Amino acid sequence: MRTPRRRQFIIAMIGPIAAGKTYVARILAERLGALHLRTDDIRARLARRGQPISRAIAISDRRRDRILQRGQAVILDFDAVHAKKQRELKALARRYGARLFF
């Protein structure tokens, strides 16, 4: 008997600074079996290495794409409040056949 394939999804967190996005994202990742991708962690690592933190978004986007290419679900822990970013995420979800939640 085949195990049904779980549907791939993307959850993009929206909220002001210190609203609890990371807290909620961690809980969701654990309960839903998704990978938690936190852009602030990438920025911190870049800063510790003396590298420009402006690279964080591009690095996060590449990691997100690799996660989705493997058919895994991902929770994006950054502020996805801008309409342009939301359009990009909608297009990405369509490309991978993933459900998108904000």
Image (cartoon, rainbow, N blue to C red):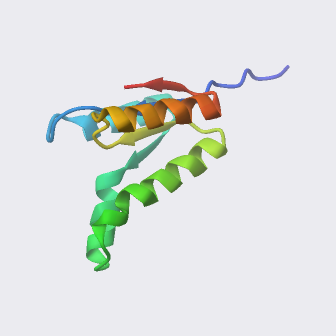
Q: Quadrant of the C terminus?
A: top left
Q: Residue 98 in the image: x percent, y percent?
A: 58, 28
Q: Is residue 38 left or right of residue 94?
A: left
Q: Nearer the viewer, residue 35 or 69?
A: 69
The residue at the point 43 percent across, 54 percent down is 60
Q: How many discs appear?
A: 0
Question: Can residue 30 be seen in this snapshot?
Answer: no
**Relative to 62, is 7 on the left or the right?**
right
Q: 83 or 43: nearer the eye?
A: 83
Q: Residue at 48% of width from left, 26% of height from top?
A: 100
| Above or below, 94 relative to 49 | above
Q: Quadrant of the N terminus?
A: top right
For residue 3, side relative to residue 73 (left or right): right
Q: Residue 12: horizontal and vertical position, in percent?
A: 38, 33
Residue sitting nearer the eye, 54 or 1: 54
Q: Which of the 4 image quadrants contains residue 81?
A: top left
Q: Is residue 76 above or below residue 42?
A: above
Q: Residue at x 29, y 66 (%)?
A: 53
**For residue 41, what is the image quadrant?**
bottom left
Q: Is residue 16 left or right of residue 81?
A: left
Expressed as whole percent of the image width and height from the top left, the position of residue 66 reads: 59, 51
| Residue found at x 56% / y 48% | 65
Q: Residue furthest front?
A: 84
Using the image as rendered, state which of residue 78 and residue 81 is in the foreground. 81
Residue furthest to the bottom in view is 50
Inspect this view and state whether residue 43 appears: yes
Image location of residue 36, percent across then percent down: 42, 44
> Which quarter of the picture shows residue 4?
top right
